[in-house]
Amino acid sequence: MKKRILYFSLLVYFLFFLGVSIIFSQTPAPSQRWVCLLIKNGNREEHTATLSVDPNNRLLPNSQTFFVECLPVPGNNQQRAGQICTTGNSNLDIQIFNQDNLAELRRIHNYEFQGMSIANPTTSDNNGTVRDFTWKSYTPQEIGRRFLAVNFFTPAPTVVTNQSGDNTQKLGTFDFSNVVNRSDCQIISWDPYGRVFDAKTLEPIAKARVTLERKDSQGNYRIVTPGGDIFAIVNPQFTREDGFFNFVVPDGDYRLQVEAEGYEFPVIERDEINQNFNLIYTNIYPSQTGEEIRQRGKIEQRDIPLRLKPGFSSQDNRPKIMEYFHDLDKQGSRVIIKGRSSHPFSIIRAYSLRVKNRSSGVNQGRIDSVRIYTESESFSGSNDIERYRLLTNQNNSTSLRTDKNGNFTLIVNTFSFEEGEFFGLIEVSKTDLTKSENLINRSIKNVIGRFFKTTLAQQNSSQQNLSSVLKLEPIFNYLEGYAYDENNKPISKAKVTIKLPFSQKPYFEIEADEKGYYSIPSEFLPSMPYDIIYQNPITKERVFVDKVRLISQSVNSGKRTNFYDYKISTLSAASRIAKESDNLRNNRKRESQENNLSRERSQSLAENLNPKAQQKPINQTNNPIVLLLLTVFGLFLVISGVLAVVYFTKQKQNNL
């Protein structure tokens, strides 16, 4: 009897720990859902934005919600070009991104978060929304920014069938009327306070030193420094390729001093400036506005021409994309680039790239309406990529013009892409600003139509040496394939992780089958650039996947996978049951959540402008199956314990 009870107890303990191990090994990591916030208005003087939830793209209902601000970042040897998002709090960034994005934005942009009028994180209501709130932040330079909300959820398990018809893969699904992520948000930027430009060519001047001076009570001008009524300032400022400078200061009397190699300041005579200046620049300093800048209640803007010194030539200032946001409209299968070029009225063109098919030899190029492209162009370290064709944009034109500040929105359809074709490459070219016909506004452009497009195309082809190229990693709408290691061998049961570049936490994870096959539908992939990582479950070795390699594998294997297709998973019975269980739990928690929301609403804006972010753990959906199994194992433990006590009590009585 003693041995039987002992064996039974050991069996129960073994089953318990085995069950717990199985449960937690199969519990997927929390997945992320990002949605854009609407910008109702922005206050230029105070650098605040009033934000609200988009009624057409709501939050997950009754869910913990994090709010972030995203700023574009340039690429260099230390970082990839793209964007970095922050909650405005280092500890909160570490909690949801596993890295301090606030510190990184401070280093890159001198960014300062100055507060928001709602708790971060907060809980969405039954309708997937929260009350409107304000966000305040500061950067010395003119930088575009956008705002998003992030929800975390644990997908319910279901089964996906691979190409051979075998049910081999477990995948998470989530049933929500608008589950697809969206990050093609509104962008806000505080209007630039001035540009330094060449009086002859009207092009912006880079590396100009702009110094702001303030008149004191004795009438003397002194260089402005941080302190007193000035929160933060970088003074002097050195302009970049776009010539912009930006000072945020309180009311007072000021003046500017400018220095640039090969140029003279100030330009007093108006006839020394090309006559087209008024189509681009305003408030010319000091010839139009005078030397003294009197700021009273609103921020003053100044554009500053410089005269070329005798014996010097104008800057060879090649145009470039200063900043951009790169997104995929998942349901519309469209690539969206919102950005800003360095030069006014630049010409933007988009090109697709293509993977060469080894089985058919080197591609001979494609003839389109403009020219033939046959040159091979390296991309992502691969020599199997070539520039393929010039793409049309949302206006069905092969080029578009930026506005006078360099802003543009480029939309490219991908549904017609051929096998092995992907986006992308952007070419930016500058125009001759001294010719009036190059400064025609958009309304006139629409009237003259085809003639205008031809003019731009001819002009651009004659200025190839004045262009620059931006290469972009593709954003796939759907993933399917096999996980390979560095030696091109399939990884059985590989963990496939989707991760945002500015985060060290998984966006989504899935397990491949025994052959290394996996597929990820559109609703579980970000609409912004992301990384793909394979991990060997035995060796734990991680492989960072080149997306171009995925295309190449598909092309050369003959599977013809279209990674830009919009494919979503079907809702299984298991996920519907999980959803119903979630609704029951949400109903039980609703009362306490509403109480929390009431407390949040009672906080005043003044108290929240310098908040201490609440450090709440990221919610993970509880699984009712897990709770049931834990309960069963607990009962086994209790029964085995009772039997053991009874046995040892009887043994003691017999011994007496």
Image (cartoon, rainbow, N blue to C red):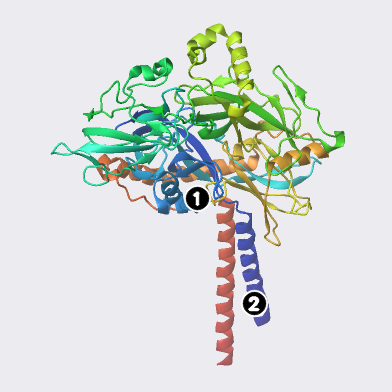
Q: Residue furthest left?
A: 218
Q: Which mark is residue 97?
A: 1
Task: Give residue 461's position: percent from left, percent from top.
Answer: 64, 21
Q: Earlier in the sequence, mark 2 or mark 1?
A: 2
Q: Which mark is residue 5?
A: 2
Q: Nearer the viewer, residue 460 or 58?
A: 460
Task: Give residue 638's position: percent from left, percent from top.
Answer: 55, 69
Q: Nearer the viewer, residue 115 or 331?
A: 115
Note whether residue 603 is visible. yes
Instruction: Work out which quarter of the rendered image holds the N terminus and state it.
Output: bottom right
Q: Secondary structure at mark 2?
A: helix
Q: Residue furthest front?
A: 311
Task: Give residue 241's position: percent from left, percent from top.
Answer: 47, 34
Q: Nearer the viewer, mark 2 or mark 1?
A: 1
In this rendering, would 483 be left or right of 616?
A: right
Q: Residue furthest top?
A: 447
Splitting the image into 4 quarters, where does residue 400 fall?
Answer: top right
* Residue type, mark 2 in image: Ile
Note whether residue 47 is visible. no
Splitting the image into 4 quarters, where does residue 641 fall?
Answer: bottom right
Picture residue at 48% right of the left edge, 29% below the top: 314
Q: Secondary structure at mark 1?
A: helix
* Residue type, mark 1 in image: Phe
Q: Nearer the viewer, residue 625 or 306?
A: 306
Q: How many C-alpha atoms fall within 10 Å of the one at disc 1: few (<14), some, or many (≥20)?
A: many
Splitting the image into 4 quarters, where does residue 525 fall?
Answer: top right
Task: Give residue 434's position: percent from left, percent from top.
Answer: 48, 17
